[in-house]
Image (spheres, rainbow, N blue to C red):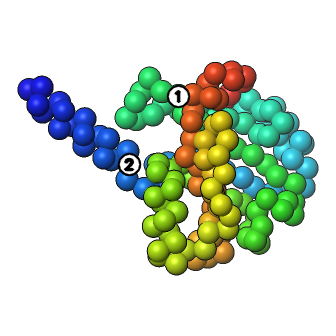
Amino acid sequence: MDNHKEQHSDSDNMNELTPKVTGIGGIFFFTENPQKTREWYAENLGIEVNEWGSSFEFRNANRPQEINYLQWSPFKNGSEYFDPSKKEFMINYRVQNIEGLVSKLESNGVTIVDKIETFEYGKFVHIMDEDGNKLELWEPIDSVFTEMGGESTK
């Protein structure tokens, strides 16, 4: 029985190394007045907002004791953060093994907009999909958000 546990554990470790998307990490969109939009959502839909938008809490399916986050953020119309995309939204995808994923994407001819950047709450890189949407890939360290505290939408 212990041998089976070790094999299962090795399998779980291999799955965590597979370069892939594991979920949605954020939804970003343009609005004329981000502050007014945040206030409207707070007042009418009960979303806990901060200066960036709102962090939605959820549990990790594989590690239910772990709190994960999805960021919802309105941006001022025309924000350069979405460049070179001309779309009015950007989706952030939670990923594992971001370095391996970028390598895979490069070999598939996908446009990588920038270099991987590392922050205390995770690693980020931006890519373009075939429809001209800029996508943000995030390998999160959710425990940093949990330690920071603050209001979140639950």
Instruction: Pick the residue in front: 137 or 69.
Output: 137
Q: Which mark is residue 85?
A: none
> Image quadrant for the C terminus?
top right
Q: Residue at x 52, y 63 (%)?
A: 102
Using a 10 Å C-alpha cutoff, classify the residue at mark 2 as few (fewer than 14 neighbours), some (14 to 19) or many (20 or more).
some
Instruction: Kindly indicate the quadrant of the structure image that contains residue 115.
Output: bottom right
Front: mark 2 or 1: 2
- Give SS at disc 1: strand
Residue 71 lies, in percent from the top left, at 67, 42
Residue identifier under label 1: 67
Q: CA distance from mark 2 to mark 1?
A: 20 Å
Q: Residue at x 51, y 53 (%)?
A: 98
Q: Residue at x 66, y 51 (%)?
A: 117
Q: Is residue 82 among the parts visible in the rendering?
A: yes
Q: Is residue 63 left or right of residue 59?
A: left
Residue 99 lies, in percent from the top left, at 51, 56
Residue identifier under label 2: 17
- Give SS at disc 2: helix
Q: Is residue 154 among the parts visible in the rendering?
A: no
Q: Is residue 46 left or right of residue 140?
A: right
Instruction: Kindly indicate the quadrant of the structure image that contains residue 141.
Output: top right
Q: Is residue 100 above or below residue 153?
A: below
Q: Residue at x 80, y 32 (%)?
A: 50
Q: Amino acid at mark 1?
A: Ile
Using a 10 Å C-alpha cutoff, classify the residue at mark 1 as few (fewer than 14 neighbours), some (14 to 19) or many (20 or more).
some
Q: Amino acid at mark 2?
A: Leu
Q: Earlier in the sequence, mark 2 or mark 1?
A: 2
Instruction: Pick the residue in front: 83 or 123.
Output: 123
